[in-house]
Amino acid sequence: MSGFLLTVLGFVAFAVGLLFSIGFHEFGHFYWARKFGMRVPQFFVGFGPTVFSRRRGETEFGIKAVPLGGFIRIVGMIPPAEEGESRRATRMRSFIAEVRGQALNDVLPTDGDRVFYKKPWWQRVIVMAAGPLHNLVLAVVFFTLVLTVLGTSVLTTQVRSVPACVVPAGAESATADDPCQVPIVTSGADAGQVCEEGTANCALPVASPAAEAGLRPGDTIVAIDGQAIDPTDHASWTTVQDAIRAHPGDEVALTIERDGERRQLTVTPIATTVYTDQTGEDTMTAGYLGVSPVPGFARQSLSDVPGYFANVITQSVARLVEIPERVPQLFRAAFLGEERDRNGPIGVVGVGRISGEYFALTEFSALEKLSFFLSLLASVNLVLFLFNLLPIYPLDGGHVAGALYEKARSTVARLRGRPDPGPFDIARLMPVAYVVAALFVLLSGTLLVADIVNPITLQ
């Protein structure tokens, strides 16, 4: 199959997987709403014009043209106005009254207690949390399949290369053909600058500790300080890195395997300057050995899944928190031609493009491509879970927070001997909902433009 057709296949496969993930999310809301007796007149995947729909029972199921979300319509999401509410006309109150009226128009005389706002607070929490939790289930299932059945890309503890010397991060000689033969300033404000050998504070870069200890390309590290490590475990190379970085100037015992035999080596990492993240802006002092790993592809044990998943969740939360500070760079990349930040946010079109690119790469097997594809879908579902549970209306988390607030308010009133204040009036948050929706549309539009004109690629 040609590269173009494989690219199209990867993009279409991701689109289908995304639609399935959205539909499974909405099914979570739908199942529990129906189980608790709520009336659900609509279940749609997508937004915009309706492409296909069919009514089954009291619910219309369908697909809309823009596959960027989905919805189910539960009758009575917004309660009637609270008694004693001020009727003094203001623009905001008129707006809220209009929204409330539109929602209550869906309520039929026969609905009775089937409306959302009449249900107990815990049922509403379950209904609104079920959608994101379905995405979490998919993420766990996909990641588990990838790790334990298909296999995943890992950095093994086999040594790929051993540099002859240590060149500090940011050194002026780093791009030279043979930086080991270029003298640099060894300390002070000008450290790393090229200098003339023989002058004060100027010398050739120091030899690599790995080379001095006798490590060679092809060696496999199987233990560090007596602690055995699995060469193909997803966390083993990180274990090696952490041990080396934490011991600048201290001896570290390595057990290596070379030509089928095990050997003991003692290395002494030197203190050097390294980047703290992929941006290359901040540095720190850490132990440096001077080895790089051989990439691999291997299955992991079931016991590795919780730790792996916890690490992915931590990274995903960090990426979500970083989105506001990365939006300005995204805007410049989309409209001003600035180079795209590879660690910045990416939209569904961009993820679909990456899926297509990976499918077209010839150096990966079909199994590796399937593993990568399911990992993408797992990551997308994890983001959907985290994002939708943000306690901001109109996200699912906003409804959950409203129901929890209603329960807390009712409990406080009961403890004080006061009557139950009734359902929390979510309609009062509609102005917030419109602002959040507008920001989301702006971000989605910017991501769409950036993913088309200045995409993140695998190359």
Image (cartoon, rainbow, N blue to C red):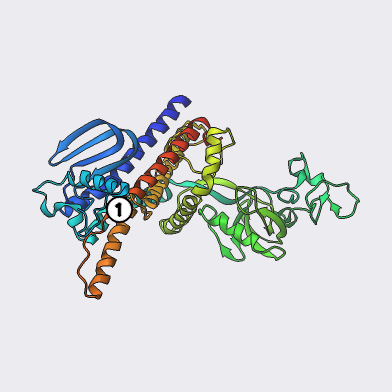
Query: What residue is drawn where x is 52% and y is 52%?
Result: 232
**Could one spot residue 16 in this view of the protein?**
yes
**Near-viewer residue (287 or 220):** 287
Q: Is residue 454 above or below residue 178?
A: above
Residue farthest toward the front in the current orientation of the protein: 88
Instruction: Name the side, left or right, on which 29 lies relative to 446.
Output: left
Q: Quadrant of the C terminus?
A: top right
Q: How many marks?
A: 1
From the top left corner, tell me how far across and down residue 251 is, in percent: 70, 65
Instruction: Name the side, left or right, on which 457 lies relative to 46.
Output: right
Residue farthest toward the left in the current orientation of the protein: 110
Q: Which residue is mark 1?
A: 428
**Near-viewer residue (225 or 334):** 334
Query: What residue is drawn where x is 79% and y is 52%?
Result: 191
Q: Quadrant of the N terminus?
A: top left
From the top left corner, tell me how far across and down residue 318 is, in percent: 49, 53
Query: What residue is drawn where x is 58% and y is 32%?
Result: 337
Q: Is residue 24 above or below residue 428?
A: above
Instruction: Name the side, left or right, on which 328 lies relative to 126.
Output: right
Residue farthest toward the bottom in the current orientation of the protein: 416
**Near-viewer residue (187 or 176):** 187
Q: Amino acid at mark 1?
A: Arg
From the top left corner, tell me how far across and down residue 356 is, in percent: 45, 32
**Could one spot residue 1 in this view of the protein?**
no
From the top left corner, tell me how far across and down residue 230 is, in percent: 53, 57
**Near-viewer residue (113 or 7):** 113
Q: Residues within 10 Å of mark 1 (few under 14, many from 20)?
A: some
Query: What residue is drawn where x is 20% and y is 51%?
Result: 33
Instruction: Tell me the element at label 1.
Output: helix
